[in-house]
C-alpha cells in the first residue's frame, strides 16, 4: 500500500511539473507576447513565481519517492535471495531526473532571482534577458522530462 501511495505521489508530481512546463512554454508565453514588455514581464514573474513554489515541492517529491521505490525493490529482491540489477530505463530515469532537479534549482534560485530583482527595479532589459534564460533552461528540462516519460513507458 505504501509503495502504491508513493508511486501515485511520484507520477502526480511529474504530471504537474512536466505539464506545467508545457503549459507555460507553449501556451502562456505565446499569449503573453501580445502584451507590452512591462506587463508581460510582470505577468511572467508572477506566474512563474507561483509555479516554481509548487515545482520546488514536486521536484523534491519526485526524487524522494523515486529513490525510495528503487531502494525498496532492490532490498526486497536481495532479501528474497535474488540478484538485483536495475533496469536501464530506471538508470536513465534516475540520472536524468536528478539532472532535471539540479537544472530546476538553478532556474529557481539563480535565474528567477534575476528576473524578480529586475522586475522589482523596473530594469526591463535585464528582466527580458533573465526570462530568456529561464525559457532556455525550461526548454531543456521539458525535453528531458518528455524523454524520461518516453523511455519509462517504452521500458527501454
Image (cartoon, helix red, strand yellow):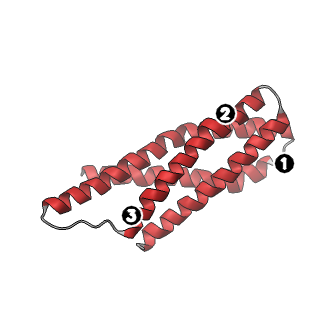
- Vertical comparison of 149 with 136: above or below: below
Mark 2 lies on a secondary structure that is: helix
Badge 1 or badge 3: first in the primary sequence: 1
Camera sees residue 121: yes
User: Which residue is labeled 1 in the image?
Assistant: 34
Task: Give the class, few, some or many, for how many residues have Cα within 10 Å of label 2's Cα (few <14, many ≥20).
Answer: some
**Tag 1 and tag 2, C-beta contact below 8 Å:** no
Say which of 44 and 81 sits in front.
81
**What is the residue that sits farthest to the right in this orientation?**
36
Q: Quadrant of residue 106?
A: top right
- Is 80 positioned to the left or the right of 104 in the image? left
Residue 105 locus on image (x, y percent): 56, 42
Could you tell me how far apart the alpha carbons at marks 1 and 3 are, in whole angstroms? 42 Å
Label 2 to label 3, Cα distance in Å?
Answer: 33 Å
113 on left or right of 16: right
Which comes before the other along the chain, label 1 or label 2? 1
Q: Please tell me the numbered disc located at residue 113.
A: 2
Q: Which residue is mark 3?
A: 90
Vertical relation: 69 (above or below) 107? below
Q: In which quadrant of the rendered image does the C terminus lie? A: bottom left
The image shows residue 108 at horizontal and vertical percentages of 60, 39
Mark with earlier residue (2, 3)? 3
At 17% from the left edge and 61% from the top edge, which residue is drawn?
78
What secondary structure is marked by label 1?
A: loop
Give residue 76's position: percent from left, percent from top: 19, 58
Crowding at label 1, few (<14), some or many (≥20) Cα neighbours within 10 Å? Answer: few
Distance in Å between CA atoms under marks 1 and 2: 24 Å
Percent across and percent down for residue 98 are: 47, 52
Amino acid at each position: 500500500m505504501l509503495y502504491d501511495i508513493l508511486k501515485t505521489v511520484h507520477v502526480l508530481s511529474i504530471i504537474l511539473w512536466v505539464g506545467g512546463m508545457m503549459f507555460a512554454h507553449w501556451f502562456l508565453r505565446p499569449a503573453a507576447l501580445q502584451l507590452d514588455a512591462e506587463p508581460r514581464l510582470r505577468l511572467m514573474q508572477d506566474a512563474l513565481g507561483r509555479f516554481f513554489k509548487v515545482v520546488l515541492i514536486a521536484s523534491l517529491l519526485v526524487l524522494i519517492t523515486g529513490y525510495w521505490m528503487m531502494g525498496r525493490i532492490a532490498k526486497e529482491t536481495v532479501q528474497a535471495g535474488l540478484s538485483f540489477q536495475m533496469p536501464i530505463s530506471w538508470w536513465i530515469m534516475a540520472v536524468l531526473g536528478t539532472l532535471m532537479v539540479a537544472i530546476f534549482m538553478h532556474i529557481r534560485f539563480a535565474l528567477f532571482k534575476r528576473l524578480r530583482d529586475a522586475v522589482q527595479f523596473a530594469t526591463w532589459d535585464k528582466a527580458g534577458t533573465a526570462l530568456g534564460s529561464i525559457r532556455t533552461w525550461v526548454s531543456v528540462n521539458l525535453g528531458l522530462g518528455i524523454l524520461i516519460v518516453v523511455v519509462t513507458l517504452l521500458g527501454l
